[in-house]
Image (spheres, grey):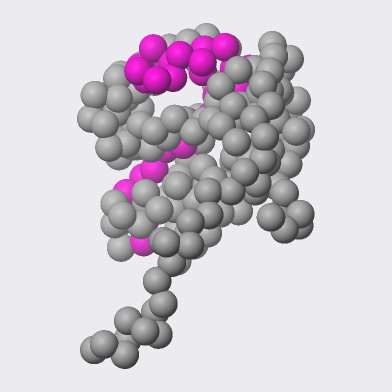
Amino acid sequence: MDTKLDFIWTRRSVRRFTPEPVADADLQSILEAAMSAPSACCRDPWSFIVLRQAGRKAVAACLPNGGFLADAPLGIIVCGHQQRAHAASLSYMLQDCSAAIENILLAANALGLGSCWLGIHPREERIAALRAALNLPDGCLPVGAVAVGRPAESPGPRTRFDAGKILDGDALLKHQ
């Protein structure tokens, strides 16, 4: 593994956190990184809900696998707005929000924090529960949540590289 990419290899899902709060400057950097994600036609169809206290517990209760969010010092809900996406496309909005979530994960790791992505969309029961819990306006779709904090566990670096998943595009074209 190329050490220049350690910020990727060492980014792992962390589900146990110390109680130490996430500094405001780190939160600002994480949100700046999220909003630096690529977006189709620079439409930036996202918004971010920051949860520092009781909100984490309410959101964790809506996510069957998200109990650890209640104990994380910080939660970020990434929401998408389809009407603001390129061509008002659900697919573009989801891709843009997913890129923002990945930037959150990488930024947290670069800052020495742990994080874990919790899927919300496309699970209708999770979407409905979060819409109710957070009183989200129409057109605001919760796509994913990220728990963030100082890690209380240290999963080792890894890659899941699999050469069997690589196709030779030039060879595919020759068969047409």
Quarter of the image where the N terminus is located: bottom right
User: Is residue 23 covered in magenta?
Assistant: no
| Residue 114 falls in image quadrant | top right
Q: Is residue 115 above or below residue 31?
A: above
Direction from residue 159 to residue 154 in the image, left or right: right
Q: Residue at x 40, y 20 (%)?
A: 65
Q: Residue at x 40, y 53 (%)?
A: 95
Nearest the eye: 171 or 8: 171
Q: Residue at x 60, y 36 (%)?
A: 12
Q: Is residue 128 above or below residue 170?
A: above
| Residue 132 falls in image quadrant | top left
* Residue 46 visible in the displayed image: yes
Image spot of residue 146 (x, y percent): 52, 30
Image spot of residue 82 (x, y percent): 32, 49
Image spot of residue 10 (x, y percent): 68, 41
Quarter of the image where the C terminus is located: bottom left
Image spot of residue 122 (x, y percent): 27, 37
Q: Residue furthest front?
A: 164
Q: Is residue 135 above or below residue 9?
A: above
Q: Residue at x 53, y 54 (%)?
A: 161
Direction from residue 107 to residue 15 in the image, left or right: left
* Residue 106 visible in the displayed image: no
User: Is residue 69 covered in magenta?
Assistant: yes
| Numbered marks: total | 0
What range is drawn magenta here? 59-86
Nearest the eye: 43 or 123: 123
| Residue 136 falls in image quadrant | top left
